[in-house]
Image: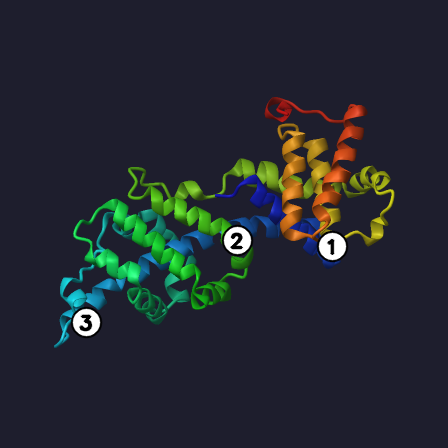
Amino acid sequence: MLSRRSVRVKVMQFLYAMDRDVDLNATVVTKRYAERINISFELLLFNIYILREITRLSIDDKRKRKAKHLPTDLDKIFTTKLFKNDVVQFLVNDNYLNSKVDKFGFADKLDKDYFKKLYTEFAATEPYAVFIRQEESNIENSVEILLELFRFCRQSEFYNDVIEDHYSAWIDDKSLVIGATKKILKSLPSLDRDVLSTYFPDDETVNEYGAELLARTIQEKELLIEIIKPMLKNWDHERLAVIDTILLNMAVCEFLFFESIPTKVTLNEYVDISKEYSTPKSKEFINGVLDQVLKKLDTEGKIKKKGRGLIQ
């Protein structure tokens, strides 16, 4: 679920928090990093759970439509196929998801009115009416309407506000969770009953890379600054944007201590992150500084790469 880019962003955020709060130390930050990784996965399952429970309300909807004295044409042909399809039923019967729903207390976080509001609004949309009118029911149609439901929810201020009330990390993790949720929906139903558990962040990315990057950047801070400072000829190091300083430190840390990551990948990733999280001119600044640092370290024989890290 978590790519190295996502992990880099999380490490950057914790280093920034540490810079802003003098009471935060390496031990506390490392612990919070691990907790945050788990929350990202919890958020993924929370979104899957919400979608599942929204579809369940098609059962109540059918009952109400059937009781109408003057049903519309759509009422007459309405079915519960939004819920009773192989994709959703896979989620309904998934032991792993159900165990996490209980563990994380999802049912206590949201009441039926939350799902009812979202379902009612979605039921009034044209894509849902088109889905109901489709004579053929298949997996492709089911996945398509679930993706449409998810798109509808993401555009709902109500949907986002409630999730954010329970998970402050939603703002930062939103794009990550959206991508993973869409990927899961497109893979269902799956012969692999453990498909959801495979999205739990792998240990290599989270710990061997992420936790180590966080710890090393903190531990080697003075060394990293010493390496970077000479490249800041026309810049006052003390006046650099905090995010820029953090990104430079992290990148140089990767150059020096992460042998399996190609230097070109490191440089490109941090330039890309700067475009989203720092100032408008940060892209050129970070690219220029890192390029100079890399050339100097390479000349001094301090870049030691092996395996995948040798790829240029």
Q: Nearer the viewer, residue 108 or 62?
A: 62
Q: Secondary structure at mark 2?
A: helix
Q: Position of residue 244 (x, y in %)?
A: 73, 48
Q: Residue at x 75, y 44 (%)?
A: 285
Q: Secondary structure at mark 1?
A: helix
Q: Which quadrant of the figure contains the C terminus?
A: top right
**Mark sitting earlier along the chain (3/2):** 3
Q: Position of residue 311 (x, y in %)?
A: 62, 24
Q: Which numbered disc, 1 or 3, marks the residue closer to the eye?
A: 3
Amino acid type of the residue that numbered disc 2 sits on in the rendered structure: Asp
Q: Give the alpha-carbon distance from disc 3 to disc 2, as whole Å.
A: 38 Å
Viewer can see residue 244: yes
Q: Which mark is residue 19?
A: 1
**Mark sitting earlier along the chain (1/2):** 1
- Residue 106 placement, left or right of 124: right
Viewer can see residue 29: no
Q: Residue at x 66, y 31 (%)?
A: 264
Q: Secondary structure at mark 3?
A: helix
Q: Nearer the viewer, residue 223 or 301?
A: 301
Q: Position of residue 22 (x, y in %)?
A: 75, 58
Q: Provide the residue designation for mark 2.
A: 173
Estimate how packed mark 1 is, as few (under 14), some (14 to 19) or many (20 or more) residues with alpha carbons within 10 Å: some
Q: Position of residue 303 (x, y in %)?
A: 73, 26
Q: Residue at x 31, y 48 (%)?
A: 95
Q: Provide the residue designation for mark 3.
A: 64
